[in-house]
Image: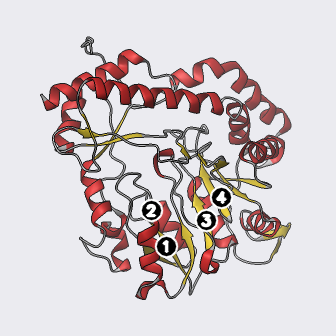
Amino acid sequence: MRTPGRKHVPMLDLERQYAPLHDELLDALGRVLETHQFILGGEVAAFETAAAEQLGVSHALGCSSGTDALWLALAAAGVGPGRACVTTPFSFFASVSSILRAGATPVLADIDPVSFNLSPTAVTAVLDGPRGANVRAVLPVHLYGQISSGFGRERGITVIEDAAQAWGAEWHGVKAGSLGDIAAFSFYPTKNLSAAGDAGLVTTNSADLAERVKMLRQHGMRRRYYHEELGWNARMDGFQGAVLNVKLKYIGAWNEARRVVAARYHALFAQAGLAEAGPYPMHGVVLPREVPGAKHVWHQYVIRAPRRDLLREFLAARGIGSEIYYPVPLHLQEALKGLAYAEGDFPEAERAAREVLALPIFPELDEDEQQTVVAAIAEFFS
């Protein structure tokens, strides 16, 4: 592998995505200004229809953020006081905080060390244990762009997908957002399909659940000023609907470009002699894997590495971006002490938090930049 000249490699460069869409996006935003439909409205409705068709679901409902989408999905499914929901300790904070906001109890289960997703074996152990008595739902997180699989509706348990990082991901040809009873997506600006601000989406094939989401996102109203229950102001604004409706046309190609970037990383690491079988790193790095039956959309390209923090400092000194998703498992977060877990309860999540490092990945990342990243990592381990 040739050693390229050093150059700055950003973790993400949104300018490369937005520049070609500049005029198309301005036209879409102009339509919102002309129609004055700033909350929900025609652009949001058009996006909802197109999104439902692309995902293969009956209902897609825009909302104000991915966090609100999670809360709406939980509340619509009746996961509230007196009920518990199983999820992962290795995720963004909203996966657990949304369960608490719904009034339910989060129950955690450890992750699989290869996919970083919730382990079905660990979930079964939780359901059969003392914390499983009041569990009425499981919330698998499709982490890094790969579906968390193996959670059917046995035992009458509701499946709520946290698909925030997984637009377009598939499991045996079925797309994220249509595998469970209800699902939540985020369009935070760093996501594969991203808004120009905060926005989210709830998807379901249940007309009843969809109707409840519509009500809950508008302060519990079906009819203006008649409130049936406590809801929230969780509506998508028209500008975000307009942006997303434009970008939805390109997401398939962007996801395929990410798959090309991921494959190129795999090849470059192999050429450099750095790739180890794993699941835990010894002297090089363990590369992320696409599990059989999955179609990974590579929201993140996450390696496992020994001396991870030193490696990150080394890359930063050379102008190479990276990120840690996530440095502290949820059960060890200060704000979640009330869950009554302790260090050592989830060893796989804790070890992952010490070893994972996300490298630059976005559709427009070029081969020279990837060579720069891998060459720098090779230098660190030399």
Per the model, the C-alpha gap separating discs 3 and 2 is: 13 Å
Judge the density around disc 3: few (<14), some (14-19), many (≥20) Cα neighbours within 10 Å: many
Q: Which residue is mark 4?
A: 179
Residue type for callout 2 = Leu
Residue reaching furthest to the left: 382
Per the model, the C-alpha gap separating discs 1 and 3 is: 10 Å
Q: Quadrant of residue 1?
A: top left
Identify the mark nearer the N-term, 1 or 2: 1
Identify the mark nearer the N-term, 2 or 4: 2
Identify the mark nearer the N-term, 1 or 3: 1
Per the model, the C-alpha gap separating discs 2 and 4 is: 15 Å
Per the model, the C-alpha gap separating discs 4 and 3 is: 9 Å
Q: Secondary structure at mark 2?
A: loop
Q: Which residue is mark 3?
A: 160
Q: Which mark is residue 94?
A: none
Residue at image coords 24%, 24%? 272
Q: Which mark is residue 86?
A: 1
Identify the mark nearer the N-term, 4 or 1: 1
Camera-nearest label, 1 or 2:
2
Q: Which residue is mark 2?
A: 118
Residue 142, position as x, y percentages in the image:
52, 53
Residue type for callout 3 = Ile
Per the model, the C-alpha gap separating discs 1 and 2 is: 10 Å
